[in-house]
């Protein structure tokens, strides 16, 4: 393009800079290595609502941290129905992953990995990255998680639930070692169930978006 063409070029789509990436660390400083190096994490805070363990990286001495938070739920909306809870967890995790895709992209650009997933009676938050990024990562994840609504997600809910049924039906067509590992994970849970029991439950019982909304309110 000539200089004249560049100057006279018109674009109907507004161009701008990307938003600020708050996950980029402001410092790479390390804490001084203690005289007595601990082999295991040490509990540094404890209360009725929270327990906090910490262990400094004295081996590789990188300005990075691994954070794992388990948020226990006050109650379980599915009672003792482990299969129902598992199905709602699976759908909820897929929706959360989709809703956090922009946040995930910004985190990846700052060399931060994270995951936010629902369990039987808890929410598991895990993150790995630079020390100075952790505060913003956890704060952003919890803030964005609280913003998720289900007003326009009935269609995607049906698609995800159908995918769960198909995955359950195709489970025994997988390689033998995959079946063994997954089956072992299922039977080690309390209460436990088999993949065949999950498939029968999903085919026999109707799970609706209202069930997911009730489950999400507890989260």
Image: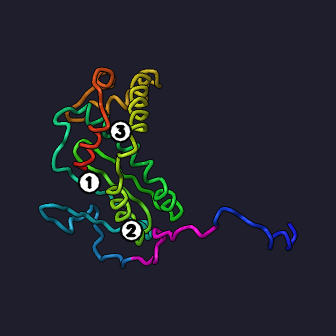
Q: Which residues are magenta?
A: 15-30
Q: Quadrant of residue 134?
A: bottom left
Q: Which mark is residue 70?
A: 1
- How far is disc 2 from disc 3 in space, using C-alphas? 26 Å
Mark 3 nearby-residue class (10 Å; few <14, some 14–19, many ≥20) = some
Is residue 69 depicted above or below 3 in this figure? Answer: above
Q: How many numbered marks does the figure carry?
A: 3
What residue is disc 2 on? 136
Residue sitting at 38 percent across and 32 percent down? 161
Residue sitting at 20 percent across and 32 percent down? 81
What type of secondary structure mainly makes up the magenta span? Answer: loop
Q: Secondary structure at mark 2?
A: helix
Which circle's residue, 2 or 3, is located before the other in the chain? 3
Which circle's residue, 1 or 3, is located before the other in the chain? 1
- How far is disc 1 from disc 3 in space, using C-alphas? 17 Å
Residue 165 position, x and y percent, is 39, 26
Does the image show residue 91? yes
Which circle's residue, 2 or 1, is located before the other in the chain? 1
Left or right: where 206 falls relative to 18:
left
Does the image show residue 58? no
Residue 118 position, x and y percent, is 30, 46
Residue 167 included in the magenta stretch of the image: no
Residue 169 position, x and y percent, is 41, 22
* Dots 2, 3 in contact, CB < 8 A: no
Nearer to us of marks 2 and 1 is 2
Residue sitting at 30 percent across and 77 percent down? 35
Residue occupying the far left of the picture: 48
What residue is disc 3 on? 90
């Amino acid at each position: 393009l000539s200089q004249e063409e560049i100057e006279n070029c018109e674009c109907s789509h507004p161009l701008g800079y990307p938003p600020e990436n708050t996950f980029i660390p402001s410092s790479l400083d390390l804490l001084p290595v203690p005289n007595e190096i601990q082999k295991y994490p040490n509990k540094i805070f404890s209360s009725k609502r929270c327990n906090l363990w910490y262990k400094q990286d004295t081996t590789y001495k990188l300005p990075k941290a691994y954070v794992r938070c388990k948020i226990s739920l006050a109650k379980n909306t599915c009672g003792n129905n482990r299969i129902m809870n598992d199905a709602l967890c699976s759908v909820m995790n897929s929706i959360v992953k989709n809703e956090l895709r922009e946040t995930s992209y910004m985190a990846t650009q700052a060399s931060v990995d994270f995951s936010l997933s629902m369990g039987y009676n808890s929410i598991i938050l895990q993150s790995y990255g630079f020390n100075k990024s952790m505060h913003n990562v956890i704060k952003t994840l919890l803030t964005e998680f609280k913003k998720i609504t289900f007003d326009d997600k009935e269609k995607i809910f049906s698609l995800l639930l159908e995918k769960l049924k198909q995955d359950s039906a195709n489970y025994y067509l997988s390689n033998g070692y995959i079946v063994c590992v997954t089956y072992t994970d299922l039977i080690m849970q309390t209460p436990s169930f088999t993949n065949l029991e999950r498939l029968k439950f999903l085919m026999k019982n109707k799970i609706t978006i209202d069930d997911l909304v009730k489950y999400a309110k507890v989260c």
